[in-house]
Image: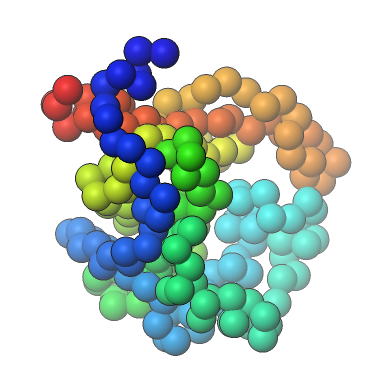
Amino acid sequence: MSDSADADLGVDTEPFRHKPELHGDAVILHLFTENDIAAMGPILADPDVLRLTGSVHTSAEALNAPSELDESTLAWYRGLAARPDRLDLAIIDRASGRCVGEVVLNELDAANGSCNLRILIGPQGRDRGLGTETVQLITDHAFGTTGLWRIGLQVYSFNPRARRVYERAGFRAEGTLRGALRFDDTHLDAIPMSLLRTDWNEKLGGT
Ligand SMILES: CC(C)(COP(=O)(O)OP(=O)(O)OC[C@H]1O[C@@H](n2cnc3c(N)ncnc32)[C@H](O)[C@@H]1OP(=O)(O)O)[C@@H](O)C(=O)NCCC(=O)NCCS
């Protein structure tokens, strides 16, 4: 592949050791505070978040999730600042000062310079451009300050809004995982997408 000749970045073994605070016009992304963690309870229980992230398999499950985080989930959030293998940031809506969701770079494969991206925003933050700005900020951080080469993700076919946000950030679809998600006894497709350092450079107008 000619792409590999375009950069000599070496292996960045811990691209997520540094935990940034990223500022945009509409959002601030930063490590979770106790207030942010508390706000995540209802967001993670939101039926649309549960359905669109493939976290549940039936409408009934989506409608009946507890809106308080249990002790192990609280401990998980509190431990994220110390994790060099992943970057989890709260999405703060500048308009309200509140945490409205999270964006995550995880599944690090340092040898290949790749990771996964996921994002979720609760009802109070959606459809106001916050997701678009968040994905731009985190991908700019990843390619601008680490040696990562590839960010991958999967989006379900019933989520054109998320696909649009990823495409605006430069992600390209890579095919179709047919029938990858079972929901209410139907099988739905997932679309793998990725953003390579070369795509990001191209978007910046660089080489
Ligand atoms: C997906 C998500 C991160 C997007 O963030 P957001 O802040 O709501 O989205 P934005 O307002 O930044 O942008 C949405 C874009 O999708 C477009 N859009 C909205 N509904 C759409 C639809 N049904 N079909 C096509 N495009 C659509 C909007 O027009 C907008 O594009 P534009 O700015 O070019 O006009 C957020 O809605 C979310 O977290 N949803 C629930 C969980 C989820 O889906 N996570 C992603 C799993 S892969």
Q: Choose between 71 and 167: the one closer to the eye.
A: 71
Could you say which is closer to the camera, residue 19 or residue 100? 19
* Side of 22 where 131 appears, left or right: right
Question: Where in the figure is residue 125, as x and y percent of width and height?
Answer: 39, 63
The answer to which image quadrant residue 81 occupies is bottom left
Q: Is residue 25 left or right of residue 92?
A: left
Coordinates of residue 171 in the picture (x, y in percent)? 39, 31
Q: How far across and down, in percent of the image, does residue 152 sit? A: 49, 37
Q: Residue 1 placed where, x, y %?
A: 41, 13
Q: Tell me the residue at 20%/59% (across/down).
A: 24
From the viewer's perspective, tell me whether residue 81 is left or right of residue 109. left
Which residue is rendered at x = 47% and y = 44% of the image?
110
Q: Residue at x 33, y 66 (%)?
A: 19
Pick the residue in front: 199 or 168.
199
Residue lying at the far left of the rendered structure: 205
Using the image, determine if residue 59 lies above or below residue 154. below
> Which residue is rendered at x = 52% and y = 22% of the image?
174
For residue 97, which quarter of the picture? bottom left
How many numbered marks are there? 0
Q: Is residue 132 visible?
A: no
Res 4 seen here: yes
- For the C terminus, give its image quadrant: top left
Along the horizontal axis of the image, is 38 left or right of 206? right
| Residue lying farthest to the front in this orientation | 10
Q: Is residue 96 above or below residue 136?
A: below
